[in-house]
Image: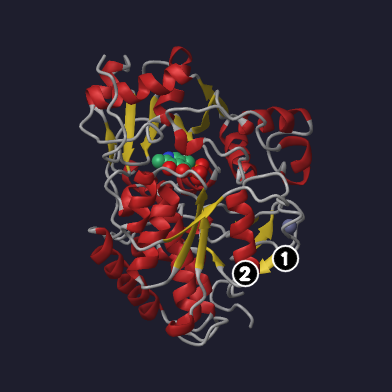
Amino acid sequence: MTLLAQPHVGWKCAVCGERVAIDKALAWRCPNASDHDTHHVLQFEQPIAPLRSTGDENPYVAFRKYLAWDAFAGALGLSEDERVALIREADEMVRVVAGTGFRFTPFARHDALSDALGFSQLGGVWVKDETNGVAGSHKSRHLFTELLHLLAAEKTGHASWSSKENRPNLAIASCGNAAFAASTLAKAVGWPIQVFVPENAAAELTDLLQSVDARIVRCPRLPNDPPGDPCVHRFREAVAQGAIPFGVQGTENAWCLDGGRTIGWEMADSMERVSGPPLDRVFMQVGGGAFAACGSSGLFAGGLRPALHAVQTQSCAPLARAWQHAIETGGGKNAGPRWNDCMWPWENVQPSLADGILDDETYDWVGVCNSMAESGGSPVVATEQHIIDAYALAHKVTEINVSPTGTAGLAGLLALRSQIADDERVVVVFSGVRRHFMPLPIAQ
Ligand SMILES: Cc1ncc(COP(=O)(O)O)c(C=O)c1O
Ligand SMILES: [Zn+2]
């Protein structure tokens, strides 16, 4: 099928340069990627200017025409009205299960946090609060475009299954916010999902997943397993047998990189109504990297270019190492073809209070490095004390019930504060809610 609706939208592998047409249904990764060579990642070729919200309360409707999904669904023959209707129907099903649908999340200067950190009236800290979003974190934003893709393919007869009754399983290897968000969306539309979790996953986490009907698969290391995470091995086996990758790593399903941009588009949109100078910096915590890659590219599409600081902890900092190697081997931009020189799993991951960002490999590192290079940003490696202090500070001066992973970007701001002028405008994203089983910080 030729793409007539938006001929400029397409995918290109940031590593090998292979192109994939936007109208290709169920194309999740670069055709040259395999389980033996996972070093490929599709990125959009999609100009966005100017970014304009329609004013709808649902970001996927408000920014629909900038979504790659919209070009995909249009190319499959769905009219604009049908595309809007599909988003609204899916959103309503999500609302029934999650208690909220997709809505713009709050974003504003936080006066008490700005004062606590010594910023002037002109400068300050803007907080994007994701804690009341669908499934309590930003992860659902990424997954919703994967879901919309599946629904559009199914509706137009472009899926590999014939009806709702014989849908293949969805699959994800995670036991944190991504797994909960994936299972919540799956339950909303009645789609079976397998969640591959570590052998010793805590009961609090598996209970949470079971509350939304996930089929939990515990993954002990098997005698013949190659090195690497056994959850990922079992996940890949399931995908090889026909399951659909439904996670938040661009390397496994590039469609997560589409909806993840709504977080940046929302911030850019609301800054248009704020007087004074533009944003100077944005701190985004990095695990697999999709969050920082999408959030920053969304902001940049809105005409803003704050320096991106990608924040990791001392316990696990493969991105900061990759950035260093990228600089030494030709620069931070377009480092994809230099993957082997730059990114490999962190050898000695230590525990951290910010346990949601301990991915030993930053899968979406190429996009994060591009954004840092384009914006004059840099990685920040926060100490564990910064992580602890940021969590405590957030709970002391804000009312937001945020998790330690959710305040890890703030830890990066604490680490860099002495190098930031008092009149700078900086952003942190409180990306996930504190669940009932997470300890409150020790009061300071
Ligand atoms: C609350 C929260 N913030 C940020 C991240 C990091 O996102 P990413 O893995 O896309 O880098 C995670 C990942 O699990 C998370 O749970
Ligand atoms: Zn490739």
* Mark 1 CB lies closer than 8 A to ligand 2: yes
Q: Residue 78: which quarter of the image?
A: bottom left
Label 1 secondary element? loop
Res 51 visible: no
Dot 1 alpha-carbon crowd within 10 angstroms: few under 14, some 14 to 19, many 20 or more: some
Q: Residue at x 78, y 36 (%)?
A: 341
**Left or right of 336: which side holds 86?**
left
The circle drawn on residue 354 is none
Q: Is residue 360 above or below residue 115?
A: below
Question: What label sits on residue 27 in the rendered view?
Answer: 2
In the drawing, does residue 58 fall left or right of residue 24? Answer: left
Query: Which residue is located at x 56 percent, y 29 percent?
Result: 377
Element marked by disc 2: loop
Q: Answer with the quadrant where ligand 2 appears in the image.
A: bottom right
Q: Amino acid at mark 1?
A: Pro
Q: Is residue 66 above or below residue 22?
A: above
* Residue contact at pointers 2 and 1, CB within 8 angstroms: yes
Neighbour class for label 2 at 10 Å: few (<14), some, many (≥20)? some
Q: Amino acid at mark 2?
A: Ala
Instruction: Work out whether 227 lies above or below 7.
Output: above
The residue identified by callout 1 is 31
Is residue 196 placed above or below 213 in the rendered structure?
A: above
Gap in Å between the C-alphas at discs 2 and 1? 8 Å
Image quarter hosting the C terminus: top left
- Choose between 280 and 212: the one closer to the eye: 212
Q: Position of residue 239 (x, y in %)?
A: 61, 66
**Cβ at disc 2 under 8 Å from ligand 2:** no
